[in-house]
Image (spheres, rainbow, N blue to C red):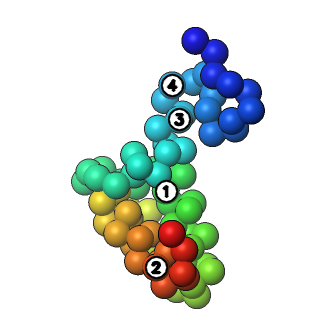
Amino acid sequence: MTQPLDNPKLDEHPGSNAEKDPDAWVSGDDPMTGAQASYLTTLCEEAGVEPPAATLSKADASKRIDALKAQLGRD
């Protein structure tokens, strides 16, 4: 099945969509994904705080992202 081309988040490579979807970042003891690390680093820079280590778990990174979004007044 071909994905609609008008949605840049979707592509024809099934493994790549999971990393782009923040809902897939919220649980697990595995290290955070590359997309999650990038987003967390961006939020840390905007909030003026030190980015966490790359070995942060998905669950802990998700908590940090939620806290930073709240601090920055984002949904």
Label 2 near label 3: C-beta < 8 Å?
no
The quarter holding residue 13 reads: top right
Q: Amino acid at mark 3?
A: Asn
Residue highlighted by disc 3: 17
Please state if 47 lies on the left or on the right of 7 as rendered.
Answer: left
Residue highlighted by disc 4: 14
The residue drawn where x is 30% and y is 60% is 59
Residue highlighted by disc 2: 70
Residue highlighted by disc 1: 36
Q: Residues within 10 Å of mark 2 (few under 14, many from 20)?
A: few
Measuring from the top left, give residue 50's x and y in whole percent: 51, 82
The quarter holding residue 43 reads: bottom right
Closer to the chain start, of discs 4 and 1, is 4
Please state if 14 lies on the left or on the right of 11 as rendered.
Answer: left
Q: Is residue 56 visible?
A: no
Q: Is residue 32 visible?
A: yes
Q: Amino acid at mark 4?
A: Pro
Looking at the picture, does residue 22 appear above or below residue 52? above
Q: Amino acid at mark 1?
A: Gln
The residue drawn where x is 28% and y is 52% is 27
Label 3 near label 4: C-beta < 8 Å?
yes
